[in-house]
Image: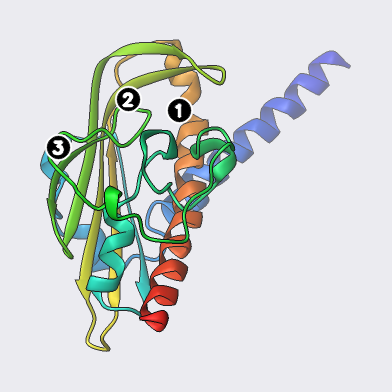
Amino acid sequence: MKREAVRRVTFVGALTTCTYLWLLRPWHQRWGATDDEVRRPLPGDEEVPTPTVRSTRAITIDAPPQDVWPWIAQIGYVGYGRAGWYAFDFWDADAGRGRSSWRLHPEAQRLEVGLLIGEEGFRVRSFEAKQHLVLAYHNPHVEWVLKEGLWPKFGDCAFSFILEPTNEGGTRLIIRTRFTLGGLGPHLLWWPFFEVGDFLQQRRMLPGIKGRAEQFALSG
């Protein structure tokens, strides 16, 4: 009886894993993006030249780049004086004590290379107003952090926001993420949650930026 139960659990686990790897993962790694956007090089690729995992996601915003850029420029962890990630505030806005802003913050618009904007160690690596913002962290050694629970900081990550004007006067917002896993170790048990969480966060963040920018463009 126990062997039969083990077989069933193993079968379900294998089927779930195959479904994710062959169907869901390829879809969510390029959600909203065109073939050209997925394939071509973008600013920030040089931060992690040989990624273990790469995703490119995109959305069209009915507002010009100059109305989208301010929302990108102030993005980041609320606890660091930024405007939030426009996604799930209960885990990325000071553990739910803050809220992603629906207004622009002049004090958060001033960017400089090296500025720390994310708990994971995300810093501004390069930017061009109304065109792109590249964030990255490099944690070659695993660091276990005790804050709102125990979690690891590991690997290398580049997180790029690309703004391109459309022929209709809007903006094509492309987000590219490139990761390495930081070597072997127990921290890799976090990876499946990290990868799925990354998609869910961006799936919420992209429409969050879109809604704010379009509202701002209409009010302006």
- Comparing 155 with 112, the one in front is 112
| Circles 2 and 1: CB atoms closer than 8 Å | yes
The residue mark sitting in front, 3 or 2, is 3
* Kind of residue at badge 3: Glu
Residue 70 at what x, y percent from top left?
Answer: 28, 61
Question: Distance from label 1 to label 3 (Cα)?
Answer: 20 Å
Residue at 43 percent across and 46 percent down: it is 84
Report crowding for label 3: few under 14, some 14 to 19, many 20 or more residues within 10 A (C-alpha). Answer: many
The residue mark sitting in front, 1 or 3, is 3
Q: Relative to residue 185, is residue 10 depicted above or below?
A: below
Q: Relative to residue 179, is residue 110 depicted above or below?
A: below
Which residue is the extreme one toward the front? 107
Residue marked by disc 3: 47
Find numbered disc 1 in the image and state the secondary structure of the residue it sits on.
Answer: helix
Residue marked by disc 2: 181
Find numbered disc 2 in the image and state the secondary structure of the residue it sits on.
Answer: loop
Q: Does residue 49 appear in this view?
A: no
Residue 158 lies left or right of residue 7; in this view the side is: left
* Kind of residue at badge 1: Trp
Q: Quadrant of residue 144?
A: top left
Find numbered disc 3 in the image and state the secondary structure of the residue it sits on.
Answer: helix
* Kind of residue at badge 2: Leu
Residue marked by disc 1: 191
Q: Relative to residue 189, is residue 123 depicted above or below?
A: below
Report crowding for label 2: few under 14, some 14 to 19, many 20 or more residues within 10 A (C-alpha). Answer: some
Q: Quadrant of residue 8?
A: top right
- Comparing 26 with 161, the one in front is 161
Disc with the residue nearer the chain's start (3 vs 2): 3
Disc with the residue nearer the chain's start (2 vs 1): 2
- Comparing 165 with 19, the one in front is 165
Residue at 30 percent across and 16 percent down: it is 183
